[in-house]
Image: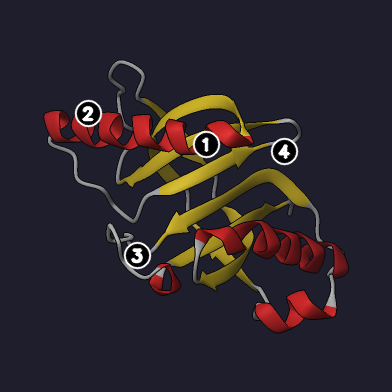
Amino acid sequence: MSAEQAEQFPDPQIVALPERHLAVVRDTVAFDGIPALYDRAYPAIFGALGRAGVSPAAPPMGVVHGSPGDTLDLSVAVPVAEPFPGEGEVGSETLPARRAATLLVRGDYARLAAAYEHLFGWVAAQGLTPAGISWEQYLTEPEPGGDPALNETLLGVDLED
């Protein structure tokens, strides 16, 4: 990790996470296709949850399965209390209970790539092994025309035991 990144971001934290149930739209996309996936997925997920009378249990997420390459295996997700039965393209995933390294990022989403680099570098420096799942949870909802400096995103890397 570079000295500049260490100054930009705080030290990550290790946390124990419970099993997490998600309503998802999952797709394999190129990086430039990520915004279109989110734009398609969240209305579908929130619509399906509303029709089923299910409320979100936590802020929305993006979950990356495996290691990014030219494409990303990405689940656009909304945490729910119980497994979601699914509807149309909206399916269900359950992330197992495990430890994770987390990093709170404040500011524009453009900072997330550098934040992930910092987080993965820190994980490696601690001798920890990623479990193949990384995620971001959007703690604030950006306002149209709002200040991106007010965004808060929690990044996480699930860890092997």
Q: Earlier in the sequence, mark 1 or mark 4?
A: 1
User: If you read the primary sequence from the N terminus, does the residue marked by circle 3 or circle 2 appear first?
Assistant: 2
For marks 2 and 1, give the one nearer the viewer.
Answer: 1
Q: Amino acid at mark 3?
A: Thr
Q: Which quarter of the figure has residue 116?
A: bottom right
Give the SS element for disc 3. Answer: loop
Q: Secondary structure at mark 4?
A: loop
Residue under label 2 = 48
Specify the amino acid type for callout 2: Ala
Q: Residue at x 34, y 55 (%)?
A: 59
Q: How is the image coloured?
A: secondary structure
Task: Tell me how far mark 3 sits from mark 4, CA to CA.
Answer: 25 Å
Whether residue 153 sits left or right of residue 117 in the image: it is left
**Which mark is nearer the camera, 1 or 3?**
1
In depth, the one of 19 and 75 nearer the eye is 75
How many neighbours does mark 3 have within 10 angstroms: few (below 14), some (14-19), or many (20 or more)? some
